[in-house]
Amino acid sequence: MTVAKETIRCPFCREPIASGATRCKHCHADLSEHKKKRSFVARYNTFRIGFLTGVLFCLILILLIYFQFYGGN
Ligand SMILES: [Zn+2]
């Protein structure tokens, strides 16, 4: 009995490898690059949200410091 594993061909050495593999077991080529391109927009959106949150947090912090120094007088 053989396990029906979904296999794809390595784009570098054309050897059959597991479809979810991130590294070819035959030529050790990094296959994660193809996945990165597919989820680039999702990664960019996550980065942008994190960046905007950071900027917003810094602005609030600057305002708080500003009012701490100049609000009292
Ligand atoms: Zn390969």
Image (tube, rainbow, N blue to C red):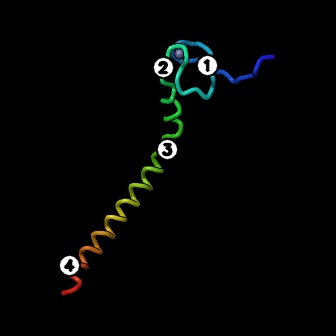
Locate residue 56, reporting x and y percent: 37, 64
Please state the horizontal and vertical placement of residue 3, each as a whole percent of the image: 75, 21
Residue pointed to by mark 1: 17
Callouts 1 and 4 close, C-beta under 8 Å: no
- Element class at badge 4: helix
Q: Residues within 10 Å of mark 4 (few under 14, many from 20)?
A: few
Q: Which mark is residue 41?
A: 3
- Whichever of callouts 4 and 2 sits on the residue coming sooner in the sequence is 2
Q: CA distance from mark 3 to mark 2?
A: 24 Å
Q: Residue at x 51, y 46 (%)?
A: 42
| 72 displayed left or right of 17 | left
- Residue 71: x, y in percent? 23, 83
Mark 1 vs 4, N-terminal side: 1
In 3D space, how far apart are the residues under numbered discs 4 and 2 (Cα atoms)?
57 Å
**10 Å neighbourhood of mark 1: few (<14), some, or many (≥20)?**
some
Residue drawn at x 44%, y 56% is: 49
Please report contact status of discs 1 and 3: CB closer than 8 Å, yes or no.
no
Mark 1 beta carbon near ligand 1 (under 8 Å): yes
| Residue beneath disc 2 | 29
Q: Nearer the viewer, mark 1 or mark 3?
A: 1
Q: Quadrant of residue 55?
A: bottom left
Look at the picture and state if 38 lies above or below 3. Answer: below
Dot 4 amino acid type = Phe
Determine which quarter of the picture holds residue 73. bottom left
- Nearer to us of marks 3 and 2 is 2
